[in-house]
């Protein structure tokens, strides 16, 4: 199972919005509403930011939002802040044979 | 507050095996799934497998079938991941991460990671 496709990097100025795409197939992203997103700062542990496509865990700022259309999921960060600079990974459930597949990761840079 | 604490770093020779532990505290271990995810240096995340302690059922990514075994000890709230026939490319940070049984599809929280270095 190949990794889900994410852009290698995206960037934006403070206060702007950025969107990270996560493209899979009908066997994973398109087949289930079970996409999650993880933020990872350098040298740190991944942190859950979005689950079940568009649900935010308690404590995650509401400037983080998720959506899905067809085989592509997206994470949008509105009102970009310096502390949002990190790597972001999507992950999708892919059925009871493959189980889970992660995206290739996107580095978000705050200019 | 659920916490996952993993065992310390390991250095192993090619062809040997490594066993990493993940001890859960602050919650009900039998209601979890414990997943194992690895990250090679400078690379992305890769799901390896999981165990559902309440059912004592483990599932593995196809890539690791036959080389990885995930077990759980409910009496100590500890999960284990054993990887055999180690190769240089198995050098990575190995994380455990919690889900909720029987079926949630996210991982939170994560353990602090265990660095496994395969070196001759």
Image: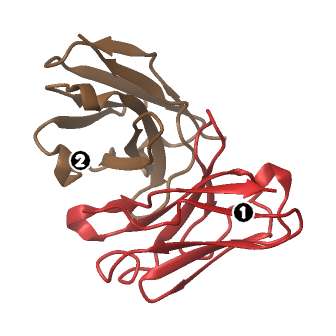
Residue at image coords 22%, 29% = B83
Drawing shade for chain B? brown
Q: Residues within 10 Å of mark 2 (few under 14, many from 20)?
A: some
Q: Residue furthest bottom?
A: A70
- Identify the chain of the residue marked 1, using the numbered disc in the image: A
Q: Residues within 10 Å of mark 1 (few under 14, many from 20)?
A: some
Q: Residue furthest right?
A: A15
Instruction: Say which of A109 and B31 sits in front.
Output: A109
Rendered red, the chain in question is A
| Marker count (numbered) | 2
Q: Return the x and y of residue A96 as percentages of the image width and height.
A: 24, 67
Instruction: Say which of A71 and B110 sits in front.
Output: A71
- Specify the quadrant that holds the C terminus of chain B: top left
Query: Which corner quadrant of the image does residue B29 belong to?
Result: top left
The residue singled out by tag 2 in the image is B58
- Identify the chain of the residue marked 2, using the numbered disc in the image: B
- Specify the quadrant that holds the N terminus of chain B: top right
């Amino acid at each position: 199972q190949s990794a889900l496709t994410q852009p290698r990097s995206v960037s934006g100025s403070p206060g702007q919005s950025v969107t990270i795409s996560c493209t899979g197939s009908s066997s994973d992203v398109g087949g289930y509403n079970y996409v999650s997103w993880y933020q990872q700062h350098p040298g740190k542990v991944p942190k859950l930011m979005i689950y079940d496509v568009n649900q935010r865990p308690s404590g995650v700022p509401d400037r983080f939002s998720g959506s899905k259309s067809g085989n592509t999921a997206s994470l949008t960060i509105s009102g970009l802040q310096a502390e949002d600079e990190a790597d972001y990974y999507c992950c999708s459930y892919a059925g009871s044979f493959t189980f889970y597949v992660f995206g290739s990761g996107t580095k978000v840079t705050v200019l | 507050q659920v916490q996952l604490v993993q065992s310390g770093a390991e250095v192993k020779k090619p062809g040997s095996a490594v066993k990493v532990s993940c001890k859960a505290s602050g919650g009900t271990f039998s209601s979890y799934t414990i997943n194992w995810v690895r990250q090679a240096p400078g690379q992305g995340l890769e799901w390896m497998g999981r165990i559902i302690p309440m059912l004592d059922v483990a599932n593995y990514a196809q890539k690791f079938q036959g080389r990885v075994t995930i077990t759980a000890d409910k009496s100590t709230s500890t999960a284990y991941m054993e990887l055999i026939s180690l190769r240089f490319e198995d050098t990575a940070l190995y994380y455990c991460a919690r889900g909720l049984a029987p079926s949630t599809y996210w991982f939170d929280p994560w353990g602090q990671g265990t660095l496994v270095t395969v070196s001759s």
